[in-house]
Image (cartoon, grey):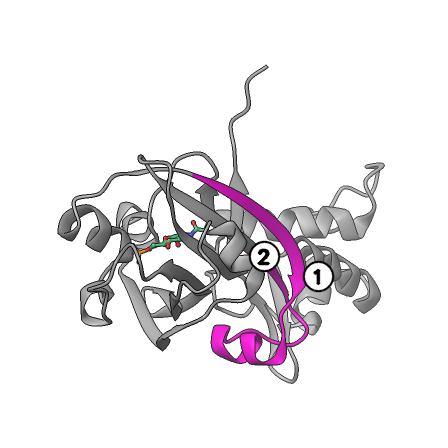
Amino acid sequence: MNTLLDKQSPLPMYAQIAQNLKKKIQKGMFQAGSPIPSERELTETYEVSRMTVRQAITNLVNEGLLYRAIGKGTFVSEEKIEQPLQGLTSFTEDMKARGMTPGSEMLEFYTAAPPSEVTVKLQLHETDQVVVMKRIRHADSRPMAIETTYIPVTLFSDLNQEAVKQSFYAYIQEKKQLTISHARQTIEAAIAKKDEAALLLIREPSAVLQIERLSYLTTGIPFELVRSTYRADRYKFQSENKR
Ligand code: 16G
């Protein structure tokens, strides 16, 4: 009789196996990015059918704890980054606070007339131009998000790639001596587009989180409209709510 499972328990066998595997992941017995034992090995460990093992694995895949790589096996997922919704930190500050190394790859940087809804949101005149900055944001050299930032040229006429190489918020606060005040943000679920999946190094189809942030200076002027695509397998958003 297998001692890992309780045949008298009302909890089905596959759920007990899923729980047991989960514990092993939490204890670090199976590391992020490493494969878990094969289905055959698991049927021997738990003395159950392959179908039962498969169902346990499917549950953990659906929970996001494991992922399947075709032809390679089943692997332990990376832990998600828990990002507070309150507060107004930059990507660079966030990653540093977690002990990770922030990085950016600039994909596009140009000045142009913005789409009309961007003009409205940034409270610009029809003829005003914006700097469009598209970056892949990295944490420990791994892609986490793609950000497209629209910045009014009228506010930052000296803005260039070099100035924002490290951090856009650092440029605003340190170089321009301006104070960031608040932002309005929306989050939506989506399926990654082909080019996004390629940039984020995720399989297709994969879920992503689309965030739009409109941020203001203390003067009440909006200084950026940012559209970001975050990896849903690496991010979860957290908030504290009071009544
Ligand atoms: C964060 C912000 C973004 C801001 C960026 C500046 C969200 C959804 N986005 O990614 O609005 O432009 O930080 O980062 O929180 P940086 O100072 O590292 O360039």
Q: Position of residue 96 (x, y in %)?
A: 26, 51
Viewer can see residue 104: yes
Between residue 134 and residue 117, name the one nearer to us. 117
Question: In the displayed structure, would residue 195 be above or below residue 159?
Answer: below
Q: Are marks 1 and 2 in contact (CB under 8 Å)?
A: no
The mark found on residue 57 in the picture is 1
Kindly tell me whether mark 2's CB lies below 8 Å from ligand 1.
no
Q: Position of residue 32 (x, y in %)?
A: 47, 62
Q: Position of residue 60 (x, y in %)?
A: 68, 56
What's the distance in space between the residues labelled 1 and 2, CA to CA? Answer: 25 Å
Q: Residue at x 70, y 71 (%)?
A: 39
Image side of residue 141 versus residue 42, left or right: left
Q: Quadrant for the C terminus, please.
A: top right
Q: Which residues are magenta?
A: 183-210
> Tag 2, which secondary structure?
strand
Instruction: Give the quadrant of residue 125.
Output: bottom left
Between residue 86 and residue 132, name the one nearer to us. 132
Of pointers 1 and 2, the one earlier in the residue sequence = 1
Q: Amino acid at mark 1?
A: Ile
Q: Residue at x 53, y 53 (%)?
A: 120
> Tag 1, which secondary structure?
helix
Question: In the displayed structure, would residue 176 be above or below residue 140?
Answer: above
* Residue for badge 2: 209
Instruction: Give the quadrant of residue 202.
Output: bottom right
Q: Residue at x 68, y 65 (%)?
A: 42
Image side of residue 226 versus residue 21, left or right: left
Q: Residue at x 46, y 49 (%)?
A: 123
